Amino acid sequence: MSYLLFYNPDSANIVVRMALEELGVDYRDELVDRRRTGRSEAFLRLNPRGLLPVLVDEEAGVTASETGAILLYLADTHGALAPKAGADRATFLKWLFYLSNTVHADLRLQFYTARYVGDEAHTDTLRTRMRERFGANMALIEDALGGHDGPWLMAGGLTVADFYLGACVRWAQLYPSAGPVAPWVIDGLPRLKALLGELEQLPSVVRAFEREGIASPLFIEPTEALPPRP
Ligand SMILES: N[C@@H](CCC(=O)N[C@@H](CS)C(=O)NCC(=O)O)C(=O)O
């Protein structure tokens, strides 16, 4: 089984890379221009939206995009890192979709604000509001983590959703790295911090970030912000 991951350091591809490393599957990667306008025609054929990540399952001839969809594809293909059926499956899907369509989607409003508001006068207001919403989203997760034993989102153990959560918390604390509205600060939330601390210890996670040239700390008060995305 061999995969090709299109990436740019610390973009959403890092979520998929953590999963690939944890699964221990064979994969190679290809760097994509950081500027959206720099996307090659070959890349745009794979994902006309021009977004990272894209994962190609070379053996199966499958091209996948959208972070949540890729995670689900990997978990289902390898029968790992996700509950397979029943109530646990429903809870897992709830978290995966919540991370994708609410937490990550909100972060895009924070990172690419000008595209959404058009008028620069509203940029800081939207960023501030989105930062508050991120805090509320994390408070919800903190409560949910109190409902079962163990550090992960799911009582049954580590799933791909934990990788997605970890990356979102990382980005919220780092970006936007410039401008008057400072990134979100993790305050309190001991269960979330425990989850992030466990995540940071996983050899697969350390390898994933190393391969993108990113050093610890990764999830709690990370320091290595990359330059603003054009
Ligand atoms: N909904 C997409 C969002 C992915 C996304 O926002 N990717 C960013 C990198 S972290 C990107 O490609 N941004 C370039 C742009 O929006 O122009 C997903 O989940 O994969």
Image: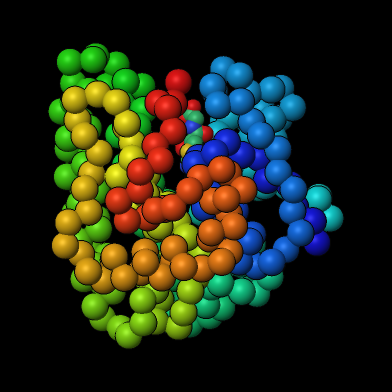
Which residue is more in the foreground, 110 or 215? 215
Q: Residue at x 56, y 30 (%)?
A: 49
Q: Is residue 3 left or right of residue 225?
A: right
Task: Give percent across and percent down for residue 187.
Answer: 17, 56
Colour style of the rendered protein structure: rainbow
The residue positioned farthest toward the right in the image shown: 59
Taking the image as drawn, is residue 225 in sight?
yes
Q: Is residue 147 left or right of residue 211?
A: left
Quarter of the image containing the C terminus?
top left
Q: How many marks?
A: 0
Task: Give percent across and percent down for residue 204.
Answer: 58, 64
Task: Give percent across and percent down for residue 126.
Answer: 20, 30
Task: Give percent across and percent down for residue 98.
Answer: 36, 57
**Quadrant housing residue 44:** top right
Q: Residue at x 59, y 57 (%)?
A: 207
**Quadrant housing residue 137:** bottom left
Q: Is residue 22 left or right of residue 199?
A: right
Quarter of the image containing the N terminus?
bottom right
Which residue is more in the foreground, 155 or 24? 24
Taking the image as drawn, is residue 66 in sight?
no
Which residue is more in the foreground, 36 or 199? 199
Indicate whether 32 appears above or below 66.
Answer: above
Q: Residue at x 40, y 57 (%)?
A: 166
Indicate whether 113 appears above or below 98.
Answer: above
Q: Residue at x 49, y 41 (%)?
A: 10
